[in-house]
Amino acid sequence: MTEYEFPLHTVSALVERVDRMPPSAPVRRWVLRDDNQRHYHGQVGVADDPTYLELRWKPNTRGQEQVVGTFRLHLARLAAAGYIQLEGDGANANQFRLRFYRGERGVVYIQARQGDPALPIGVVDVTLG
């Protein structure tokens, strides 16, 4: 059986798994929950590109958290590839909308909207929830 580790090395220009955040990086810790339509989204400023984010998953508000990973996200590249959205009008666009989604078999994706291209970045064990 083939084993995969997400994110794949072929997408390192878009997203990379890191061991730790640089001390000067703002702390972003987001928790993706299944009872919240299996997704989590928020805004990140254009000036914060690249951004570092620790992502966790849990089945519901009382469930145990699992670490999906700590990532360096290249926001402009993710937007150019269609995985996230730039928000605002024209020259006033100063925020990226970043959305994570847990799909089948516990795979976690970056995906702008349901039905859009999805980039796998990690896996959680949904049986432990």
Image (cartoon, rainbow, N blue to C red):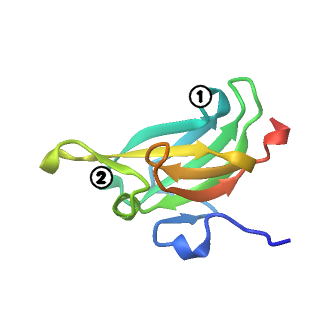
Quick check: can you spot residue 58?
yes
Give the residue at x 56% y 40%: 30
Circle nearer the viewer, 1 or 2? 1
- Which residue in the protein does label 1 denote? 36
Which residue sits at x=86%, y=71%? 1
* Residue 8 picture quarter: bottom right
Q: Which one is earlier in the sequence, the residue at label 1 or at label 2?
A: 1
Residue type, numbered disc 2: Val
18 shown above or below 103? below
Mark 2 is surrounded, within 10 Å at the Cα level, by few (under 14), some (14 to 19) or many (20 or more) other residues, namely some
Q: Residue furthest top?
A: 62
Who is closer to the viewer here, 5 or 26? 5
Q: Which mark is residue 73?
A: none
Q: Is residue 93 above or below residue 72?
A: above
- Judge whether residue 21 can be spotted in this image: no
Q: CA distance from mark 1 to mark 2?
A: 26 Å
The reply, left or right, for residue 27 in relation to residue 92 is: right
Residue in the picture at 65% in, 27% down: 35
In-image side of 49 versus 125 (left or right): left
Residue 46 bears which disc, if any? 2
Q: Helix, strand or loop at disc 2?
A: helix
Q: Residues within 10 Å of mark 1 (few under 14, many from 20)?
A: few
Identify the residue at horizontal 55%, vertical 42% (top origin): 29
- Residue 122 falls left or right of residue 16: right
